[in-house]
Each structure stands twice: as C-alpha cells, then as structure tokens.
Amino acid sequence: MSDRWLVSVDQNCIGSGMCAGAAPEHFELMDGYAQPIKDEVDADEAVIDAAESCPVEAILVKLASTGEVVAPTE
C-alpha cells in the first residue's frame, strides 16, 4: 500500500504560484492564493517539490497515517 499524504496551505500564502507551477495536478490559485486540489493525495514527489519551492513555506505535507511532517524539511 502506498503512502497517503495530507496537504494544506496556511494563511502565510502570498500567491506566488510556485506550487501550481511545480505540481499543477495538486495545486491551483483561487482568488490569488494557492490551495490544494485535494486535501489527501497519494505520495508524489511533485507535492514535495511544491512545498520546498514555496517562498514562505505555506505548504505543509504530512503522512495521513501518523501526521508526521514530510515537507517542508528544515
């Protein structure tokens, strides 16, 4: 069974669009701010890339099973 991830974007989002560019199948801009297309997704390296590319670290990716943070890493 593959890992499932919970994806969220917090209020620090500045709407840079980096996430939608890195992972358009997972993120979209709505009213100038990013939001995940789905709150829970199959593990996908593109989601990590999006979280790591966010200039204000507004994207949080956690394991759905444990809540352990997957990205961003410190």
Image (tube, helix red, strand yellow):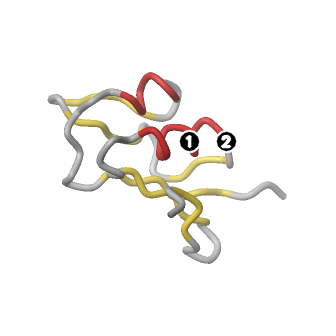
- In the image, taking residue 70 as reference, residue 53 lies left or right, namely left
Q: Give the number of marks.
A: 2
Q: Which residue occupies the foreground of this view, 69 or 73?
A: 73
Mark 2 surroundings within 10 Å by alpha-carbon count, few (fewer than 14), some (14 through 19), many (20 or more): few
Say if 49 sits above or below 3 in the image.
above
Spatial CA span between label 1 and label 2? 6 Å
For disc 1, the marked residue is: 47
Q: Along the horizontal axis of the image, is 16 left or right of 24?
A: left
Q: Position of residue 5 (x, y in %)?
A: 59, 57
Which percent across, then down, holds residue 59?
39, 51
Q: What residue is shown at x 52% (from left), y 29% (from top)?
A: 23
Q: Are marks 1 and 2 in contact (CB under 8 Å)?
A: yes
At x 64% / y 72%, what residue is drawn?
65
Residue occupying the far bottom of the picture? 66
Q: In which quadrant will I find the N terminus?
A: bottom right
SS type, badge 1: helix
Q: Is residue 21 left or right of residue 30?
A: right
Q: Residue at the spot x=79%, y=55% of the render?
A: 2
The extreme front residue here reads 74
Per the image, the residue denoted by label 2 is 44
Q: Observer-nearest residue: 49 or 35? A: 49
Q: Name the amino acid, label 2.
A: Asp
Secondary structure, mark 2, is: loop
Q: As displayed, is residue 72 above or below residue 20?
A: below
Mark 1 Cα within 10 Å, few/some/many (few <14, many 20+)?
many
The x and y percentages for residue 4 are 66, 57
Measuring from the top left, give residue 19's x and y in whole percent.
Answer: 42, 33
